[in-house]
Amino acid sequence: MAVEVLYFAWLRERIGVPRETVQTDAATVRDLIAQLAAMDEWHAAALSDLSAVRIAVDQELTDLDAPLGHAREVALFPPMTGG
C-alpha cells in the first residue's frame, strides 16, 4: 500500500523533505519506521531516537505498536509544548 509520510520540525530538516509517499507492507507504525530508517543515512539518523518522536496515523495520535491497517497518512513530529 502507499502511505504518505509527513515530517515536521527537526525531522523534516534532517531528512530533507517535508513529505514522501512510501510503498510499504508494514503491519505497524514500528515496522514502517524501521523501513524508513533503512532507506538511507538521513532517515536512519533522524529516526534513531524514537523517544523524541510522536506519531499520528490519519491525524490521530498513536504509538509505535499501532496497526497501520489502511492508513493513508503517517505524521512524525517532535513533542510539543504549550504556552
Image (cartoon, helix red, strand yellow):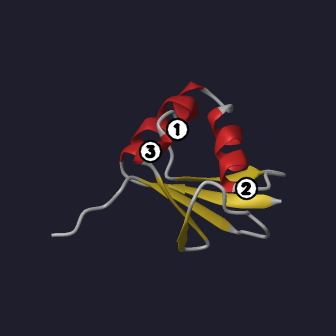
Lower sequence index among marks 2 and 3: 2
The answer to whether residue 16 is seen in the rendering is no
Exactly how many numbered labels are in the figure? 3
Q: What residue type is disc 2 on?
A: Thr
Q: Which residue is mark 3?
A: 51
Q: Residues within 10 Å of mark 1 (few under 14, many from 20)?
A: many
Answer with the quarter of the image where residue 33 lies: top right
In the displayed structure, would residue 13 be above or below residue 71? Answer: above
Q: What residue type is disc 1 on?
A: Leu
Residue 28 image point, x, y percent: 73, 55
Residue 47 image point, x, y percent: 52, 38
Q: Which residue is mark 2?
A: 28
Viewed as shown, does residue 69 lie left or right of 57? right
| Quadrant location of the C terminus in the rendered image | bottom left
Residue 57 image point, x, y percent: 61, 67
What residue is rendered at 45% in x and 50% in y? Answer: 53
The disc placed on residue 47 is: 1
The answer to whether residue 20 is seen in the rendering is yes
Residue 43 image point, x, y percent: 56, 35
